[in-house]
Amino acid sequence: MTVPDTDRFDIREYGAISDSDDPATDAIQTALDECAETGGTVYVPAGRFRTGPLRIGDRTTLHLDPGATLTFVGDYDAFPTVESRWEGWNQYGFHPCLWVTDAENVEISGRGTIDGNGQYWWQFYGADDDELPEGLRERLAEFNGKNDKADDVSSFTLRPPLFQISESENVTVSGVTLQNSPFWNTHVVYSENVTISDVNVLNPAEGAPNGDGIDIDSSRYVRISDAYINAGDDAICIKSGKNAEGREVGEPASQITVTNCTVEAGHGGVVIGSEMSGDVRDVAVTNCTFTDTDRGVRIKTQRDRGGVVEDLRFDNIVMRRIASPFTINGYYFTPLDSEPEPVDEGTPMVRNVTFSNITARNVETAGFFAGLPEQYFEGIEFDNVRIDATRPLDATDLDPAMASGYEQTHGLFCKSIADISFNDVRIRTADGPAMRFVDTESVTVDGLQVPDDQDAPIVSLENVDRTRIRGCAPDGESPFVRATGETGRIELAGNYGDLAEDVEIDEESDATLESF
């Protein structure tokens, strides 16, 4: 065997053979281990190299030349049991395909491909125990015995992620294509100062369960830029643990930026939660496009999560052919019309979220915002947003809460929010009110634009404490505002024409009109 240069570790010099049926696991791992001792670059030339799971250590650059592919074997016996975090809980599962753990100063670079051979793993998803190979049943039983998380851990979870960065610092990923992940594609957990740029993240739209693109989990100082993501599931997810354990660990996801990214297809463009019990804060998403995703920006949580999601800004985004461009949902997988419950450590909070300079065309519903009756979400702002919600409704695209207790409409729906404001917003809907507010404390509408033929009322208020409307121009042919229930003050100022004549107050409502 030829000893490589001290700063360059060519996997061929360790015995790796391209386009061979024999895995090159030992050769590649030896090169990685020796590189970690001195620092340098592990070089993967053009060609396809089959391998078992790999671990990258300190001071290592893994460089894949154009035409180089690392393909991970389809053999669960090749994947040792390790402890990491899966879907919000610290637990045991299969070794990630490519794992950067407890390492510093690592780089993955080049124009090559890292392929998780997910087809092998997807076949086990949803299978009954008696349909699984005996060895796989034994592994799942092993996980159950170690994890003590639930009575049963099935193939639904614990499949290996394609690429995981765990408990590491100063990691850069650039240029490569990451595809066909058994579970999540790229998972950054308990790490800091991670940069992911100019990558392609690919999973098929069908057949890749839990095939998220990039998941940022209890990590900080993370930057994602210039990425193309077509993952079939959520494209970019931000998480921080689940329920009591997530709160006890208490590691937030924070100081995260996403810019110049293109998302095509999948369940969501940028999704926060539902595992957010350790808090999510200080997130900026700018200069992105989302096309053919079920949701654009989605924040999801539920009772028992606890945690706070706060200080988020979404700016300069274009969305097209999306079910719901804006979703903040405190009722993830629970009914929207449930009764209030006592506020405790398991009560989540979402606050201080800004959407600006956004265009959403050919979408189904303008937006959905639902806090909890015992804890209203706070500080939702829109500025310079254009929404064309004329695409036919498809209930299968929407959150279950949206169909619970309230009729689905094309317009924006808001319930249990402390304060929400709209400045220079244009909404076109196929039918129904452009905006509907229920059980909301404060609504501010400044410069709302709607087409002349928009169905009336434009703004529907039900049990809204205070509403401020200014800079609007009703057409005068039908009610601009309709107030029902225990709605309070409706304050008008600086509108075009006599907006007061276009406010309809239900005879059983105590709503009043005032100027400000």
Image (cartoon, grey):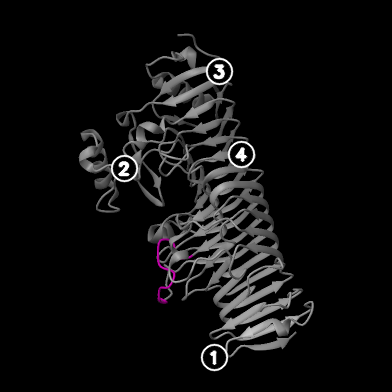
Label 2 environment density (alpha carbons within 10 Å; few <14, some 14–19, many ≥20): many
Amino acid identity at mark 3: Thr
Find out whether the residues at labels 3 and 4 contact each other: C-beta distance under 8 Å. no
Indicate which disc, 3 or 1, sits on the residue closer to the N terminus. 3
Alpha carbons under labels 2 and 4: distance apart: 29 Å
Q: Does the magenta stretch include residue 507?
A: no
Judge from the rendering whether residue 217 lies leftward or rightward of residue 506; answer left or right: left
Q: Does the magenta stretch include residue 335?
A: yes
Q: Position of residue 145 (x, y in %)?
A: 24, 46
- Residue tagged 1: 508
Query: Of circles 3 and 1, which is in front?
Result: 1
- Residue tagged 3: 6
Indicate which disc, 3 or 4, sits on the residue closer to the N terminus. 3
- Residue tagged 4: 227
Residue 243 picture quarter: bottom left
Indicate which disc, 4 or 1, sits on the residue closer to the N terminus. 4
Q: Residue 155 carries which label?
A: 2
Q: Work out which quarter of the rendered image holds the C terminus and state it.
A: bottom right
Q: Is residue 302 visible?
A: yes
Q: Residue 183 carries which label?
A: none
Question: Measuring 36% from the left and 37% from the top, which residue is drawn there?
Answer: 122
Q: Position of residue 355 (x, y in %)?
A: 65, 60
**Chief secondary structure of the magenta span?**
loop
Judge from the rendering whether residue 258 lies leftward or rightward of residue 20; answer left or right: right
Alpha carbons under labels 4 and 1: distance apart: 54 Å
Q: Give the range drawn in magenta.
A: 330-341
